[in-house]
């Protein structure tokens, strides 16, 4: 769902726009309708919309002036205007699209299609930045010299935690996937290692997989797949998707 605010001083055009949006087929939630620049200036910082429908000429000023007075807000803009083509060419530089009054439903759908694509691209970029910031944070926090003692066929060995990419459950065995394509097969269940490794930024993303978040390369939450630095792709259990999102959001403060 895309959150939006309408800034329009004429009631008739407010109604036309609201009606057209409801018929557009897109999932748009109108959080507020503002009838003046002054009202919008108070509303936008609180609403933090993803999209703003902005009238070029308001009763108490110009829409572009409003944008200049709120430089730190981040949203897509669809201008609504009765201006001629010269004014439109000027405002197009600042907007995802524009609509001429009276607004036509077909033109609105095209404009919304463009805007939603841009918003989705921004969200993907944001997730990528969040992921990188989180990995950088883990690198700083990771206890580089920590080791875990595991039983193998030859006896007992110490594995450096920083070299473990993931653990995979195989019946009553656990396969340790290490850097440089190395593997160790351990005659213990995955659960027996989970509690020990959680302190080192490992996460149980699936019944069969415990992964070292330090080695996350890509995350595809729409298809429930993560890619690790060794190129392996691991499924995220659907019930773990929310936990993964919350984990990224919690570390959003690390992003400049």
Image (cartoon, rainbow, N blue to C red):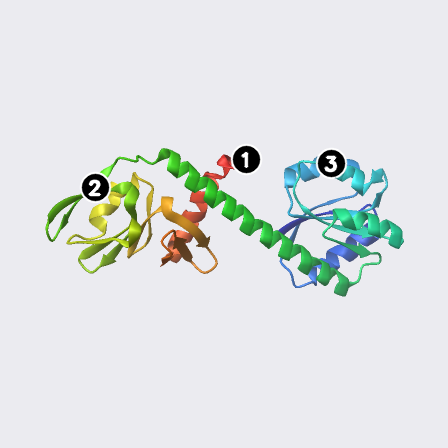
Q: On the image, numbered disc 3 is attached to which residue? A: 41
Q: Nearer the viewer, mark 3 or mark 1?
A: 1
How far across and how far down the image is residue 64, in percent?
Answer: 79, 41
Question: Helix, strand or loop at disc 1?
Answer: loop
Cα separation, mark 2 vs mark 1, equals 35 Å
Residue 38 visible in this rendered orientation of the protein: yes
**Residue at the farthest bottom position:** 106
Q: Which residue is mark 1?
A: 256
Q: Quadrant of the N terminus?
A: bottom right
Residue 19 placement: quadrant: bottom right
Give the mark nearer the N terminus: 3 vs 2: 3
Q: Quadrant of the C terminus?
A: top right
Name the residue rendered at 84%, 58% in the picture.
102
164 left or right, relative to 130:
left
x and y percentages locating residue 218 in the rendered image: 44, 52
Q: Left or right: 110 with respect to 230?
A: right
Q: Nearer the viewer, residue 13 or 183?
A: 183
Whether residue 7 is visible: no
The secondary structure type at the circle numbered 3 is helix
Residue receiving disc 2 = 148
State yes or no: discs 3 and 1 in contact (Cβ < 8 Å).
Answer: no
Residue furthest to the front: 180
Residue located at (21% from left, 54% from top) = 174
Q: Is residue 101 left or right of residue 75?
A: right
| Picture layout, residue 80 above or below residue 72 | below
* Foreground pick, 241 / 210: 210
> Can you tell which mark lies on residue 124?
none
Toward which corner of the image does residue 197 lie, by quadrant?
top left
């Amino acid at each position: 769902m895309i959150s939006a605010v309408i800034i329009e001083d004429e009631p008739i055009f407010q109604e036309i726009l609201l009606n057209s949006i409801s018929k557009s087929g897109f999932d748009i939630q109108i959080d507020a309708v503002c009838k003046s620049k002054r009202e919008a200036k108070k509303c936008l910082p609180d609403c933090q919309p993803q999209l703003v429908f902005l009238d070029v000429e308001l009763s108490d000023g110009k829409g572009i002036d409003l944008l200049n007075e709120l430089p730190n807000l981040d949203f897509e803009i669809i201008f609504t205007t009765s201006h001629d083509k010269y004014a439109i060419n000027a405002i197009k530089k600042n907007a995802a699209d524009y609509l001429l009054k009276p607004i036509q439903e077909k033109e609105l759908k095209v404009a919304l299609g463009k805007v939603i694509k841009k918003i989705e691209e921004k969200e993907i970029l944001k997730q990528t930045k969040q992921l990188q910031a989180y990995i950088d944070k883990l690198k700083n926090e990771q206890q580089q010299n920590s080791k875990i003692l595991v039983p193998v066929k030859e006896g007992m060995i110490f594995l450096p935690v920083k070299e473990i990419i993931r653990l995979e459950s195989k019946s009553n065995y656990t396969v340790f996937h290490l850097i440089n394509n190395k593997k160790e097969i351990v005659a213990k269940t995955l659960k027996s290692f989970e509690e020990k490794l959680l302190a080192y930024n490992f996460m149980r993303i699936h019944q069969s997989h415990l992964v070292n978040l330090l080695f996350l390369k890509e995350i595809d939450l729409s298809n429930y797949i993560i890619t690790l630095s060794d190129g392996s792709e691991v499924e995220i259990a659907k019930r773990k998707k929310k936990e993964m999102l919350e984990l990224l959001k919690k570390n959003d403060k690390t992003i400049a």
